[in-house]
Image: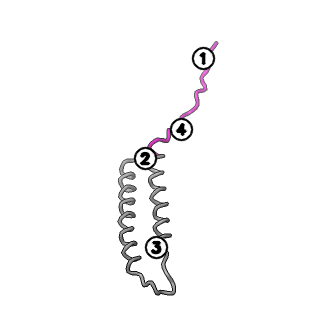
Amino acid sequence: MQSEEKKVLFRLVREIEELEVLIDEANLKANPNSRIKFDYEQLKDDLLLITQGIHAHIRISDFTPRTLKPIVGQYGR
């Protein structure tokens, strides 16, 4: 993976982590008597899955070997 792309992906992960603070704040300010409630825990779970996927992509990209052409030369006579 190109280092510029990796930098942006790491920034994206940091932004998602910062969103969690806002999610917690919104959850604390939610009206407990509201008939319809927002599922903050599900939102956090989804963001965790996204973050894990980004990290997995970064790790795989670093360690995935390139595809090489098979050796087909004939060395015997």
Return the x and y of residue 32 as percentages of the image width and height. 44, 83
Return the x and y of residue 1 as percentages of the image width and height. 43, 47
Locate the C terminus and report the quarter of the image it occupies: top right
Q: Are marks 2 and 3 in contact (CB under 8 Å)?
A: no
The residue carrying pointer 2 sits among few (fewer than 14), some (14 to 19) or many (20 or more) residues within 10 Å by Cα, namely few
Question: Which amino acid, by three-letter code, is at mark 1?
Answer: Tyr
Q: Is residue 7 left or right of residue 54?
A: left
Q: Pick whichever of labels 3 and 1 is earlier in the sequence.
A: 3
Q: Pick whichever of labels 4 and 1 is earlier in the sequence.
A: 4
Q: Which residue is mark 1?
A: 75
Say the numbered circle drawn on residue 2: none
Say the numbered circle drawn on residue 1: 2
**Which mark is in front, 4 or 3?**
3
Q: Report the residue at 53% width, 38% height from top.
A: 67
Asked if 54 appears above or below 76 in the picture, the reply is below
Say the numbered circle drawn on residue 67: 4
Name the foreground residue: 6 vs 47: 47
Question: Which amino acid, by three-letter code, is at mark 3?
Answer: Tyr
Asked if 29 appears above or below 56 in the picture, the reply is below
Q: Secondary structure at mark 3?
A: helix
Kindly report the distance in space between the C-alpha atoms of the residues bearing marks 2 and 4: 15 Å
Q: Pick whichever of labels 2 and 4 is earlier in the sequence.
A: 2
The residue carrying pointer 1 sits among few (fewer than 14), some (14 to 19) or many (20 or more) residues within 10 Å by Cα, namely few
Quarter of the figure with residue 54? bottom left
**Which mark is in front, 3 or 1?**
3
Q: Is residue 59 left or right of residue 73?
A: left
What segment carries the magenta color?
A: 61-77
Say the numbered circle drawn on residue 40: 3
Kindly report the distance in space between the C-alpha atoms of the residues bearing marks 2 and 3: 33 Å
